[in-house]
Image (cartoon, rainbow, N blue to C red):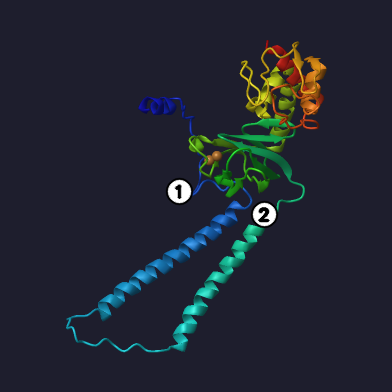
Amino acid sequence: MANLLLNCLGSLQPPAPPKLPDSPSFLMPPEASTVAGEIDWLFNVILVICTIVTVGVVAAMIYFVRKYGAKSRSHNEQGEPSSGHNTVLELTWSIVPLVVVIPLFVWGFKGFVNLRTPPRDSLEVQCTAQKWSWLFEHSGFASNELVVPVNTPVRVIIRATDVLHALWIPAFRTKMDAVPGRYTDLWFEATQTGTFPIHCAEYCGRAHSDMWSRVIVKTQDEFEAWKKAEQDKADNILPQDLGKKLSLERGCLTCHSVDGTALVGPTWKGLFGTTESYADGSKVLVDENHLKESIEDPQAKIRVGFPPSMPTFKGQLNDRQLTGLVEYIKSLK
Ligand code: CUA
């Protein structure tokens, strides 16, 4: 048991932690988004008010303890009679805090509405959280890092495939839960180029604290060049390598193994070129067309011995990606 635990711990390779960019503030990460300044300002105002109140309360307490503390004690001594009512005092302790708290509410609410309202022309990024990594997809590319142009509103549409996670970008002062079974979103506009850490801010299991990534903010020109380079890379990738990449990104390998093990679905190893039996009594040769059909319309032919549980991928893959997957399955002899 102890050995098992040690093996488990030993197999966890702690990745290098993200390097924190330089910040002008000792307490805070750099202010790298349009909302960061306002949020820090409100945070500092609340911090100052809390400090004044704390110091005031403690000072008054010490003063009153010294002034009214019993100098000598006797059991039948009567205390000072309490005054029943003091209108001026009661109005003061109601109105003064109200005057302090209402502006804080107004500023906080304005900030909240702003954070929840992405500009209409935002660049949209799909984000998928999964134990224990982030996948970002935009402009047709998938990456484990978020690459965005500077001075451009970006809306990140977030989902989780397993448990709760939370996408947190401290330098942008923004954070949102990733919830299985629904979409959530956040938006930001980066105001400076550079690399900023992304963390998971919801405890999600063993490797939660390793579930970090980076947002890379590029100038508009660098961003266009990056897109072009990614496009070239994507154009030049061998179909079967593209298929291998997709099989990981799209979750195919959750149900299909590549080593001969039967999981929820049939293994891909040695699948191509065999003749298989189907639930309707037919026998079909597994060729390119049959694989294409099974990806786009998985319920058309159900393999004997497997549940009809595969979702369709029709419309989710373009021709190149479909060919890539078929070629990858073919290569698994
Ligand atoms: Cu994902 Cu914590």
On whether ligand 1 comes within 8 Å of the CB at mark 1, the answer is no
Along the line of sight, the residue nearer the viewer: 98 or 332: 332
Q: Quadrant of the N terminus?
A: top left
> What number is the disc on residue 26?
1
- Give the vertical position of 77 relative to 164 (above or below): below
Measuring 57% from the left and 44% from the top, which residue is drawn there? 168
- Give the vertical position of 130 relative to 276 (above or below): below
Q: Residues within 10 Å of mark 1 (few under 14, many from 20)?
A: few
Instruction: Tell me residue 122's x, y (percent).
Output: 74, 46
Report the residue marked by disc 2. 116
Where on the image, by quarter, is ligand 1? top right
Side (left or right) of 80 relative to 216: left
Side (left or right) of 62 relative to 168: left
Residue type marked 1: Phe
> Tag 1, which secondary structure?
loop
Q: Residues within 10 Å of mark 2 (few under 14, many from 20)?
A: few
- Give the vertical position of 76 relative to 139 (above or below): below
Decide which of tag 1 and tag 2 comes sooner along the chain. Answer: 1
Q: CA distance from mark 1 to mark 2?
A: 28 Å
Q: Quadrant of residue 275?
A: top right
Instruction: Tell me residue 142's x, y (percent).
Output: 68, 31
Tag 1–tag 2 contact (CB < 8 Å): no
Q: Quadrant of the C terminus?
A: top right
> Tag 2, which secondary structure?
loop
Instruction: Tell me residue 274's x, y (percent).
Output: 74, 11
Residue type marked 2: Arg
Q: Quadrant of residue 38?
A: bottom right
Residue 238 seen in this snapshot = no
Along the line of sight, the residue nearer the viewer: 186 or 196: 186
